Amino acid sequence: MATRDPYEVLGVPRDASADEIKSAYRRLARRYHPDVNPDDPQAEEKFKEIGGAYSVLSDPNRRAKFDRFGSTDEQPTDPFFGGGGAGGFTDLFEMFFGNMGQQGPSRAQGRNGEDVRVDIGLTLKEVITGAHKEVAVNRTALCNACNGHGTEGGKPPESCTTCKGSGMVSRIQNTFIGSVRTSTPCPTCRGEGTIIKDPCKVCKGMGTVMETARVNVTIPPGIETGQTIHMPGQGGEGVGMGRSGDLYVVLSVSDENRFERQGTTLYTWAPLTFAQASLGDTISIEGVDQDYDLEIPHGTQPGEQLVVKNGGLPPLHGGKRGDLIIQAAIQVPKKVSEAQEKLLREFAELGGEPMPKGNSKGILGNLFGKKK
Ligand SMILES: [Zn+2]
Ligand SMILES: [Zn+2]
């Protein structure tokens, strides 16, 4: 009856987020799945325990109830325990024994499939066009050998005679206020409602096996790193009345750093010499899906923005592409020859600019002005 602290079972802190709980569960479930440990009955027990802990912590209501009453080791042994405000003893007992004491939902109710996450990388070019990708998804699937029943031969498991298939037994308890009727999970079938006398050898009676499925994912144009495609029902297969889990495809754009991205607009820098910026030029710029010939007007200033219309990215789900914006980065020579220096001074003189005194402390020991 006593179950261990579900936080302890999953190895997560009390303030763990839903995601942390889910990933801890997935990691453990994979490690202890009967498929992975075919000859280890302890692993199977552990697997069930993990499932039970997860069924508590993944359900906000059940988790809140557990948090409120502490570990299940503190289960009430007498009807005085924590009775106030719990809506009567029967409720309280059901709260503990009906929900907490059970290793997950009964077989009759079925078992929901798990949610699965996969990560997909795509290029900026694919952001423009959208993409179709096939991904490998590790998920549980109904065991073919037993059709998910968990029985050798695949017949539906026999109904438990103790509880007549309900999974719960009632008993009358005498308390100071009189007789109280309480329900607890059936000890014969451990709340499952059915009994498997001869478990399926393929799935060890679990009804499910792990499979690696190929799933086609359609990625719309305009995706950004961190966005997720939700594919309902593509996660682990549900058993019985349980529903299948969902697949979450998390996307990342591998070469996003080639540009600075702000929504549909892309930014980049074009290094220009002083001469190019002064006189004007045509340069080649590498865009996402093609190269562009970019006109540099004469007199272009540092940081000035030149626009390639529709050179950016489409909005999510497609549409008109944003712009590619190129900012002029004027390069100053780190070192000039004597002949260049002479011309620069002439240039300054012709423009009526102040004559530079020069500075010999440059990194490369520029000898500007030393000779005067
Ligand atoms: Zn039973
Ligand atoms: Zn099976």
Image (spheres, rainbow, N blue to C red):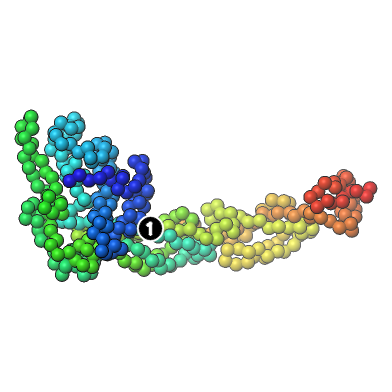
Residue 244 visible:
no
Give percent across and percent down for residue 358: 86, 47
- Which residue is painted at 17% across and 36% down in the image? 76
Q: Is residue 4 above or below residue 309?
A: above
Q: Is residue 286 above or below residue 302?
A: below
Mark 1, secondary structure of its residue: strand
- Taking the image as shown, residue 256 lies to the left or right of residue 115, namely right
Give percent across and percent down for residue 262: 55, 52
Residue 158 visible:
yes
Q: Which residue is mark 1?
A: 117
- Which residue is painted at 90% across and 53% down in the image? 346
- Which residue is painted at 50% across and 65% down in the image? 126
273, 66: nearer the viewer: 66
Give percent across and percent down for residue 271: 71, 57
Question: Which class describes the residues within 10 Å of circle 1: few (<14), some (14-19), or many (20+)?
Answer: some
- Residue 229 quadrant: bottom left
- Which residue is painted at 90% across and 55% down in the image? 342
- Taking the image as shown, residue 111 lies to the left or right of residue 305, namely left
Three-letter code, disc 1: Arg
